[in-house]
Image (spheres, helix red, strand yellow):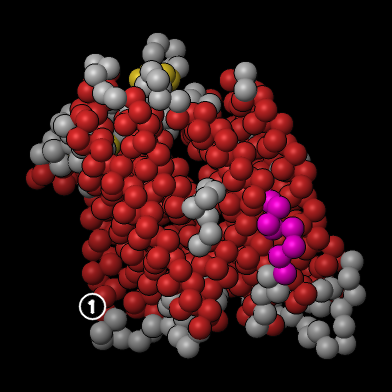
Amino acid sequence: MDLKNLESLSYFWPELILFGTILLISMLDLLMRNGRALAGLAMLGCAASLIATFDLYSAQPGWLFYRMLVLDNFALFFKVFALAALILTIWMSLGSKEIDQVHQGEYYTLLLTCGLGVILMASSSNLLTAYLSLELVSLTSYVLTGFLPHSRRSSEAALKYLIYGGVASGTMIYGMSWIFGMTGSLDYAAIQTALAQNQVSKVALFMAFVFILAGFGYKIVFVPFHMWSPDVYQGAPTPFTAFLSVASNAAGIAIMIRFFFPGVSTMAAGGAWTAVAGVEWPHVLLFVSMITMTVGNLCALNQRNLKRMLAYSGIAHAGYMLMGVAVLSNDGLQAILFYVIVYLIMNLGAFLVVVMIANATGNEDIESYRGLAWRGAVVPAVCLAVFLFSLTGLPPFAGFIGKFFLFAAVLKAGGVFVILAIVAVANSVVSLYYYAKVVKVMFLDFPDPSDKAVAVDRGNVTLLLPLTALTLFFGVYFYPLTYYASQSLRFFIK
């Protein structure tokens, strides 16, 4: 299926519904100041878009808009992921005092626009649409990071994010120009055909890949493009930080997989992938993965602010997910898709607890969690412990299953990748220290007389408990997620 513009619209309903919701919120914001009503409308639009996405699973895969976008199970997976992340973030925003301070019509408009960019990133089958969708995510993220009024920390984080993003974006588009110069096309299928003829300079192609990786790495937050992350996570509104922590990583992973697998690699019989001869980008990712997870975990050890600690934790988890890309196999890709769903649940849950405690104490430092379980917040304390141990990769939590699949895919690849698995296991052990430190502060440290009792908001608890239950459930019964991940690896190539 290769459709033109008007024909493609009938397969573009999720994006059209989301775009219509964005326009409607923008107009209603001029007439009403009820933030909860606007949030409800945003959530309703995301739900309608999600229903339209599920309806597309019965459609025939193919190219849309003159091969600018692609419709396949992989794209649909990340549409579902992005919309689920949006719904959960909006729900979290309703219970955040930080969001009460901002202009909520603009906030929800920008948040949905950022989610729309994530959806388009996973569907891009052309370097031009990949770049434009990534910039859509980036530009809205810059604004949302600095959205807190009268907050110097928020403004500083937005400026740093903008500078790093501009440099990474320029580097990436420079690499894309090299690809266009060597292959004569921006279309992934045409690029793959040109590379298969083996008439391209391998050195120039490798350098182009490195430049493009700079742009992808800035979204995924792997070293050395990670330096914006801690300041942005700490300075941005916490609900948006939660969305950024899962959606930015997932979008970067999606656009990288789309480019480096069906874009420039070839799939042989049996589902095995083969990289371009003479361009060993999987081995580059192997070293980047090891460095990223190590730097993330080591830097997290001495953090005193929980949001900043979770930022370095996110860098480490980006390193874990890169393992699945580096092994160049369907097993690795399936493990990544499983892991991004699990990471969505447990990381959003952890940030939701941060929102709840910040509402009550006005503080995000780990010290403010001292004796939390004995200050009227035993439910958030227990739930946060579940999320943190799941992030560590301990059984019987969902994070353990996610890491198990990643490590198994790496060990199956054999050779030098065994070293990668050993480094990943060692890093998981290191991460236990700083995750367990927070649990120890909540349960074993006695509160001071100056520590106030923490009032738990019921609206936040109604989201917190399902996220905790899913973290436990998928740690025991994970077949539905593994099946969904395996079915989502169906790329449309020709």
- Does the stretch in magenta take in 299? yes
Looking at the rendering, which quadrant does residue 66 occupy? top left
Instruction: Tell me the SS state at disc 1.
Output: helix
* Quadrant of the frame with the C terminus: top left
Looking at the rendering, which quadrant does residue 253 occupy? top left
The residue located at (58%, 52%) in the rendering is 315
* Quadrant of the frame with the N terminus: top left
> Residue 38, position in %: x, y?
36, 76
> Residue 478, position in %: x, y?
62, 36
Judged from this view, the residue extending furthest toward the top is: 269
Residue 266 visible in the shown view: yes
Q: Is residue 335 left or right of residue 146?
A: right
Q: Out of 281 and 93, give the one closest to the viewer.
A: 281
Q: Is residue 476 left or right of residue 221?
A: right
The residue located at (78%, 86%) in the rendering is 452
- Does the stretch in magenta take in 355? no
Segment tinted magenta in the rendering: 297-304
Q: Amino acid at mark 1?
A: Met
Q: Out of 156 and 404, give the one closest to the viewer.
A: 156
The residue located at (81%, 74%) in the rendering is 370
Looking at the rendering, which quadrant does residue 302 occupy? bottom right
Q: Is residue 17 left or right of residue 353?
A: left
The residue located at (25%, 71%) in the rendering is 24
Q: Against 256, is 169 above or below? A: below
> Residue 423, position in %: x, y?
70, 35
What residue did someone put label 1 on?
27
For mark 1, does the 10 Å Cα neighbourhood hold few (<14), some (14 to 19), or many (20 or more) residues? few
Q: Out of 448 and 178, give the one closest to the viewer.
A: 178
Q: Against 216, is 100 above or below? A: below
> Residue 425, position in %: x, y?
73, 36
* Number of marks: 1
